[in-house]
Image (cartoon, helix red, strand yellow):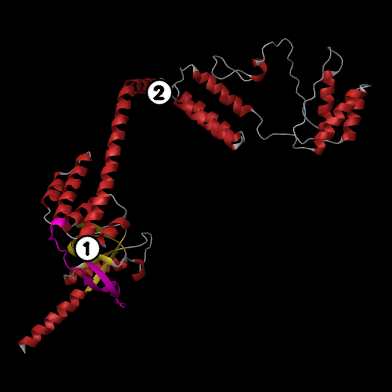
């Protein structure tokens, strides 16, 4: 009778061990031997944690495939997870629930058991990895050396972590410890968790650690180069900061910033083409970084003001009515038939080929023969504004096409 009772109890315990309370987690992968605090807020997760504490049973932590899923079902979870014992369960006054778990072993979900307020699954526990063999020992030693090498490259390393890596006895535990502390994507950690074969796991962790060491070395070199450049410019930077502080105390600090802001607004309102606006904003950033006392500052400011004042996107609609143009020319001028005919030919070409680049009309003659008045008549016939620019006495072509911005006192044409 007693033997039958013992057999029944043993069968019940085995059945209980094969069924696990499941706790879905976002962006976290718990490894065996690692202690991890969790915050649970979903109703099913809270009930699963409370049931685990009440019945003194472990939890099964499974990573969600999509972190944004608030109601994950069986198909939304990875099938391999970690059996975890609940070390502590605390309900805070603000309604939050905190669980401290310690990973024990890997498991695989066989199927889920419906009909419960929380997720319940029938599982298969993985056997402990075989640590024997010279090859496994060599991989473990290499992984330990890599981990210590990576810790040397970190700016601040807790002594407890160094001691933990040095004192972890087995390759399986060492690989799990290292991956749990590495800055990896949850999917990469899940990949390592699913590697039950120890040689494959040690090799994969070694590859991830080698990549991390390379990144840390490059980061260290970049930091060193940056530090050297900062040392060279530190004095200038400090002096400029002091000058800026003094100007602020005197109420002068905001002048340059206000000027840059006004120019930025003008650029935004100018309706420039995309490539021109991109160039203008690039020059505006240069102006903002440039000290106001610099000789290039007023030249760059003048250039930007000139850019914003150009009539980008503003054009009148041409009236290319040949008969109307003939009437306007006859009203304004008597005679000049040859010149009028050439003007009408020019307008006719423009009408037939609007996108074509027609030649420029040039009227040559002494003062008073009607050159300017003909231009006014053409503008009136086409419905355009007429602008008179007198170039009398100009000998330098730079006055027309502008100076290069590299020259002192350069101005646009």
Circle 2 SS class: helix
- Residue that carries the numbered disc 1 in the rendered image: 197
Question: Magenta residues?
Answer: 106-135
Q: Is residue 260 left or right of residue 234?
A: right
Q: Is residue 47 above or below residue 319?
A: below
* SS class, disc 1: loop
Task: Decide: few, some or many residues near mark 2? Use Cα within 10 Å; few <14, some 14-19, many ≥20.
Answer: few
Spatial distance from mark 2 to mark 1, Cα to Cα?
A: 66 Å
How many marks the image carries: the answer is 2
Would residue 310 be visible to someone looking at this image?
yes
Q: Nearer the viewer, mark 2 or mark 1?
A: 1
Q: Which residue is mark 2?
A: 248
Identified at 64% across, 28% down, the residue is 310
Q: Kindly give the residue lying farthest to the bottom in the view shown.
A: 1
Residue 85 percent coordinates (x, y):
17, 64
- Indicate the position of residue 252 as horizontal and vertical percent values: 44, 21
Considering every residue shown, the one lying at the far left of the view is 2
* Residue in the foreground of this view, choosing between 97 and 113: 113
Front in this rendered view, residue 218 or 64: 218
In the foreground, 380 or 198: 198
Q: Which residue corresponds to the image point at 89% horizontal and 27% vertical from the top-left?
A: 341
Could you say where residue 132 lies in the image, as x and y percent from the top left? 12, 61
């Amino acid at each position: 009778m007693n033997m039958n009772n013992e057999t029944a109890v043993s069968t019940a315990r085995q059945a209980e061990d094969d069924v696990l309370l499941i706790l879905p987690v976002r962006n976290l992968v718990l490894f065996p031997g690692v202690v991890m605090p969790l915050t649970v807020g979903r109703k099913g997760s809270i009930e699963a944690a409370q049931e685990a504490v009440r019945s003194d049973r472990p939890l099964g932590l499974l990573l969600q495939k999509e972190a944004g899923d608030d109601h994950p079902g069986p198909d939304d979870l990875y099938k391999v997870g970690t059996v975890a014992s609940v070390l502590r369960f605390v309900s805070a006054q603000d309604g939050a629930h905190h669980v401290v778990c310690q990973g024990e072993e890997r498991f695989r979900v066989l199927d889920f058991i419906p009909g419960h307020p929380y997720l319940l699954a029938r599982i298969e526990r993985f056997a402990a990895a075989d640590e024997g063999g010279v090859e496994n020992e060599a991989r473990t030693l290499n992984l330990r050396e890599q981990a210590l090498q990576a810790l040397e490259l970190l700016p601040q390393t807790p002594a407890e972590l160094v001691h933990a890596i040095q004192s972890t006895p087995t390759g399986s535990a060492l690989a799990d410890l290292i991956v749990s502390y590495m800055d990896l994507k949850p999917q990469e950690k899940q990949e390592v968790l699913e590697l039950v074969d120890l040689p494959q796991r040690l090799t994969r962790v070694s590859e991830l650690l080698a990549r991390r060491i390379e990144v840390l070395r490059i980061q260290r070199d970049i930091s060193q180069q940056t530090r050297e450049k900062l040392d060279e410019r530190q004095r200038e930077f400090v002096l400029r900061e002091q000058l800026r502080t003094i100007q602020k105390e005197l109420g002068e600090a905001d002048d340059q910033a206000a000027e840059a802001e006004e120019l930025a607004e003008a650029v935004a309102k100018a309706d420039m083409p995309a490539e021109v606006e991109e160039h203008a904003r690039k020059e505006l950033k240069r102006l903002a970084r440039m000290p106001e006392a610099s000789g290039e500052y007023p030249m760059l400011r003048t250039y930007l003001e000139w850019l914003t004042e150009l009539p980008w996107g503003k054009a009148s609609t041409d009236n290319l009515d040949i008969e109307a143009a003939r009437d306007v020319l006859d009203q304004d001028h008597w005679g000049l038939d040859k010149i009028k005919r050439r003007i009408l030919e020019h307008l006719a070409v423009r009408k037939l080929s609007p996108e074509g680049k027609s030649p420029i009309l040039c009227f040559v003659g002494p003062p008073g023969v009607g050159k300017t008045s003909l231009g006014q008549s053409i503008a009136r016939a086409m419905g355009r504004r007429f602008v008179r620019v007198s170039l009398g006495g100009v000998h330098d072509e730079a006055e027309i096409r502008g100076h290069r911005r590299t020259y002192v006192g350069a101005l646009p044409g």
